[in-house]
Amino acid sequence: MSLLDLTIKELQEKLSNKEITVTELTQACFDRIEETDGQVKAFLTLNKEDALAQAKKMDEEGIDADQFPLFGMPIGIKDNIMTKDLKTTCASEFLSNFEDPLYDATVVTKLKEAKAINIGKLNMDEFAMGSSTENSAFQLTTNPWNKDYVPGGSSGGSAAAVAAGQVPFALGSDTGGSVREPASYCGVVGMKPTYGRVSRFGLVAFASSLDQIGPITRSVEDNARILEVISGVDEMDATSANLEVPRFRDALTGDVKGLKIAVPKEYFQEGVDDQVAEKINEAIDILKDLGAEVDEVSLPHSKYAIAAYYMLASSEASANLARFDGVRFGKRSEKADNMIDMFKLSRSEGFGEEVKRRIMLGTFALSSGYYDAYYKKAQQVRRLITEDFEKVFEDYDVIVGPTSPTTAFKIGDQIDDPLTMYANDILTIPVNLAGVPAISVPCGFHPENNMPVGLQIIGKHFDENTVYRVAHAYEHKTHHNKQKPVIGGVN
Amino acid sequence: MSKKITTEDVKHVAHLARLAITDEEAEKYSEQLSSIIDFSEQLNEVDTSNVEPMTHVLDMKNVFREDEPKDWITKEEALKNAPDQKDGQFRVPSILD
């Protein structure tokens, strides 16, 4: 049993009782990373010196651990979240020299105020575009359960680091499933909060109407505790919601009696693996045994979500990524002798294939003569998808289904086929389009490839409480989250 | 199946997006973007007459704050990550011929 298997509550007790020091806990992360990251390759940048210095200072100050919600808690940060003075690359060649970010993202400021310790920056698909983390410009992250498989994406480094026990907690970002899908593939807990719950200030923008930062953890309770810290209105993000942040952990009663759970029939249709469906049905039976009422419902526009999403997300990305021009930061091509060529060559040399493809698609969809047919049409379908959810939520508390139609796939299997890769997100994308919160929790392993399966629980706008409550009740009954992968013979 | 997006279209879009692409890349993007556009044609099955386009999830408008000056970053800091600079300014290649 490693220190890194303990929950926030257990760790804080040990720190309070002086059974362990913050330095020991921080060092345990770097030891585990050293032991396993040669295979997993989750981290792009380690914050070792700074983290250990902070830990030492905290030990010397002798502050009571319970005065700060995340006192001494080690956390990994996805590399599209800005960290002052710590290299932030978005896993892009374009930002490979971005050594000195000038400010912290609001979530990072909040983690610092809660006295968490940043262990380092985690690999991802370049600019969060992808579902396997194979689009990183720097390294291939492998799935801790089997190194031949992808960890999912785009927050693949975050999910793999938590699954591998390198850090107990990490932050990811989720635009179309980028927290939940890798959490599902790596057998950990991943939450996408309601759009507006968490400030996006300092999250390098991909699709601003969809992006949300969310925690990836080993348990639902830890997830709730981290979300409490990072949530809240922020004057630096005008789209952050001016609502009080609940103590999400208070919702973890273990009781789901009488809760009304909807199961959309569309979430078990084309492309959903039979064994994945069976695991989800077993999970639904457990929720029934716990006293929840379960009915089948319909979200009729679900099948249009991928097409609408790729139009909208790519359009927003094409505008957001215009800032990467080689003038103020990032890499500049040395081949250009005029300004326009400098823009073009810097961007072409700095961006990978998937990023360019999406910029092209978005630029096309927004260009004169095509705007109504593609962009506006997608916005209209987005409303219909959102209304599907609203109708179901008139009668039900949560919606439950698979997080992804399959388990993790093998490295290299889908990377050459954009449309097949996009289909991995068919069950997570509608949630981003509607802006509602959803979590993925482990619900067992596929009998053929032994890879983890994730159960998705979707809630109403700003009702993370009920999502956590159902997730926690299920977790408490099954303990799937207690299983750990063996990496290179170490456990 | 005729391609929805020709290599000429691709080159035009690449120029708008400020991306330099080779002829081979134009060919590849023509195929890939055409198949993505083909795929997205399924949206036309959906009747969206009288459906208001959805631009944002939350029902919020005009979020105001006080317009007060604040200490933010210094000129030196702003230039810290610049690929090229001179006399406290960002330097770029010539804009005019």
Image (tube, coloured by chain):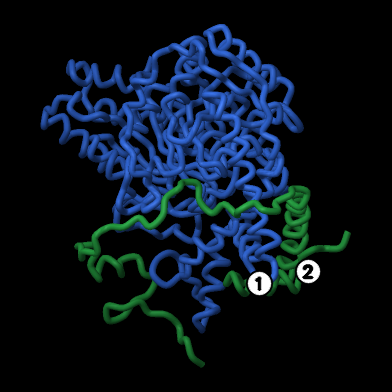
Chain colours: A blue, B green
Image coordinates for residue B63, horizontal then vertical, percent = 35, 55
Q: Nearer the viewer, mark 1 or mark 2?
A: 1
Instruction: Please name the residue that numbered disc 1 is placed on.
Output: A368
Q: What residue sits right under mark 2 in the picture?
A: B6
Relative vertical location of residue A397 with respect to residue A228 in this rendering, above or below: above
Report helix, strand or loop for mark 2. loop
A125 shown above or below B69: above
Mark 2 Cα shell of 10 Å, populated few (<14), some (14-19), many (≥20): some
In which quarter of the view is residue B88 placed?
bottom left
Q: Position of residue B16 (x, y in %)?
A: 60, 73
Q: Is residue B67 above or below residue A144?
A: below
Which amino acid is tagged 1?
Answer: Ser
Q: Amino acid under label 2? A: Thr
Subunit under mark 1: A
Query: Quick one: label 1, few (<14), some, or many (20+) residues within 10 Å?
Result: few
Frontmost residue, A451 versus B18: B18
Q: Are marks 1 and 2 in contact (CB under 8 Å)?
A: no
Which image quarter is the N terminus of chain A in?
Answer: top left
Number of the label disc, if any, that sits on residue B13: none
The image shows residue A317, relative to residue A147, as above or below, that is below
Q: CA distance from mark 1 to mark 2?
A: 16 Å
Image point 50% across, 51% down: which residue? B56
Q: Nearer the viewer, residue A195 or B57?
A: B57
Q: Share a chain, discs 1 and 2?
A: no
Left or right: A147 as drawn, with respect to A165: right
Residue A87 in view in this figure: no
On the image, the x and y values in percent for residue A350 come to 53, 63
